[in-house]
Amino acid sequence: MRRLPLTIIAFVALMTMTLTAQRRITPVTATPAAGKPVEPEKTDTAAFDPSHFVHFHDAEGNVVLVDTVTGREVADTTLSSEKDTLPKMQYPLWYSATVGVDLWDPIMRAFGQHYGLIGFSAGVNLHNRYRPVVEIGIGNASYTPDDGNYTYKGKTAPYFKIGMDYNFLYNSNPAYEAYAGVRFGFSHFSYELTDITVNSPYWDETTRFNIPSQSVTASYFEFLFGIKVRVWRGISLGWILRYHSIMSDGSPRYGDPWYIPGYGSRNGAWAGSFSIYYTIPLNKRRAPAVGNVTEEPLHSEPLPLPDQTTEQQ
């Protein structure tokens, strides 16, 4: 009978030791008291080899350290500040203004083109990205076809265009631009046909007559792609390829006009222009150095690495 209490005592002692051992090997995360913040885990920077460190900015502008061997990444906010935040655009809102002269028509007129005179443009450069543009000019036409049976004369008249350009290189060197744009243009002008000759072989006679002057208001739109290159200080040269289409020309009584000021000959959907520009700065704030501008500015010197001397000791 004495063995029974001893057996019970031995069993209770064995269970107590088992539960104690189980508590020792089971990790338990302490629940923080109400109102006390949980401290974040400290990054074991000692596991990184300093010679393998590289750094870059994430989308929030923080500095991220990367071990190129292990691939481990650490967002080190201690190295980030407001000055490290990456701006979306490098240039101020009111960056510059540009005026230009279109030399395409004068040059082509010298090589035998039958229409056009000269055009001017003016635009404001916003963030070196967007450019509202207005264009004005004058044009006329005098054309006699090869068979010589009439002469088309378009009187000198003005034209006007308004539109917007988008510079794809907005965060790059401002001396170079590659852009696309749209224009809406219109012109009120008059034209006439003279010396119209009609031959009648049957009657063996020739009839000549004129179509009186007609006034027309025409409108059209353009899609364009252009490049511009600075050649000396504020002077730049630019080339533009235009695709255009007539929206309205008033449906004149004696036929459509052959030439529309600012548009050119109605027979073609494509046109080009060559201009010389002068740029006037509008903002006194110094822009990033020419030739060193990137979409995401990089530090000129490597960022400091965590001091591991203390941890190693």
Image (spheres, grey):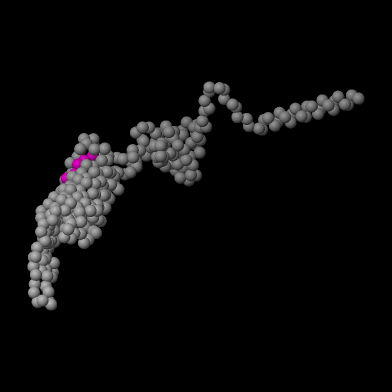
Question: Secondary structure of the magenta portion, mostly?
Answer: strand
Q: Is residue 251 above or below residue 45?
A: below
Q: Is residue 87 visible?
A: yes
> In the rendered structure, which segment of residues is drawn in magenta?
95-99
Q: Is residue 97 magenta?
A: yes
Tell me the quarter of the picture where residue 62 sits. Answer: top left
Of residue 235 and residue 255, the one placed in the foreground of this image is 255
Q: How many marks?
A: 0
Q: Which of the 4 quarters of the picture holds residue 249? A: bottom left
Task: Reply yes or no: does residue 56 show up in magenta.
Answer: no
Position of 81 relative to 122 (above/below): above
Residue shown at the point (20%, 45%) measured from the top left: 134
Q: Position of residue 240 (x, y in %)?
A: 22, 54
The quarter of the rendered structure image containing the N terminus is top right
Image spot of residue 72 (x, y percent): 49, 42
- The residue under the point 18% across, 48% down is 160
Q: Residue at x 66, y 33 (%)?
A: 25
Where residue 102 appears, as percent x and y from the top left, is 16, 52
Q: Is residue 80 left or right of residue 137?
A: right
**Could you say which quadrant of the image residue 174 lies in?**
top left
Q: Position of residue 140 (x, y in %)?
A: 12, 56
